[in-house]
Image: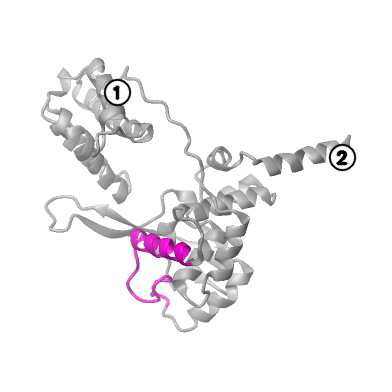
Amino acid sequence: MTVDELFAVWHLSRKNKVKQSTYANYKTLYENYLRERFGSMKAENLNAFMLNRYVDDMLTNGGKRGLGLSAVTVQTVMILLKSVLEYGEVEFELPNAAKHISMPKTHAAEISVFSEFEIRKIRSCADTGNSIELGFLLVLFTGLRIGELCALTWADIDTAEQLIRVRKTLLRISNQGNSAQKTSIVIDTPKSKTSLRDVPIPTFLLGPIAKLKANQNDTNYFLTCSPRPTEPRTYTLRFKSFLKRIGVPYRNFHALRHTFATECIKSGVDVKTLSELLGHSSVKITLDRYVHSDMQLKRRQLEKLYSSL
């Protein structure tokens, strides 16, 4: 059995066990990073030395420019290959060459956030009568993910209860098979069960949201105020243009969510509550990602110690 054949069987076995976006991502990863190197080889001819050499090669020469792939990307690729070979071992008694490969060490990327001055500028410059710019504030003060925001319809916004009901996400995925279009937009459930959540609407945004909602059908999307949604890539470009217009240095859209979480920690919001607001699958994710106090916070905490002694 070739690696191509083994991957095809493994991939089919995952179809009803993972989300549509994850299923498509498996195929994309395989096509981009594994098929050319190993696809035509017999799975039983793979060995650990060969795979470890490939890990080193991806780290130093991988990518379109040949400058090397990140450790995170290489790790993701090799986790996929390990899963495929483990399946071959269990289902077809094939030797598993991935048992003893060395995964590259990864380091948590530094989180980019907006400063307090930049937060105030974004808040003061955003047009709350414009759903596109209102969306920037909604993420900055609720921590919604961009896909969750793009999938939000007016039916999901309960102004009476002052809640946003997060039940779906929007993303663009690679099409499988021989479709004429390479990608398509899909609306799916969020990335984990804990991502299904209710998020309070900030009080200062309630009036503008209620005013916009008064003229909308429930089936219309929040950002476009129409039956057709906008996608994350397009919305990110709108955000980039907004920052340029108001004179705030560009940071990617996810920095709004990071800023919300970081400011919550600074303000003393307990980690369990923050984890639920962000829709994390575990409190550990929130702790690892955001509970690393800055120098200002360290000083405040030490002042508490000094005043108590």
Q: Secondary structure at mark 2?
A: helix
Residue 151 visible in the shown view: no
Q: Is residue 254 magenta?
A: no
Q: Position of residue 17 (x, y in %)?
A: 31, 43
Q: Residues within 10 Å of mark 1 (few under 14, many from 20)?
A: some
Residue 160 image position (x, y, % from top left): 58, 75
Name the disc covering residue 307, or none: 2
For the question of whether residue 60 can be seen, the reply is yes
Give the mark count. Answer: 2
Which of the pair 302/23 is nearer the observer? 302
Rate crowding at label 2 as few (under 14), some (14 to 19) or many (20 or more) other CA atoms within 10 Å: few
Residue with the mark numbered 1: 56
Q: Amino acid at mark 2?
A: Ser
Q: Amino acid at mark 1?
A: Asp
Residue at the image point whose x is 25% and y is 15% from the top: 49
Which residues are the magenta region? Answer: 218-245
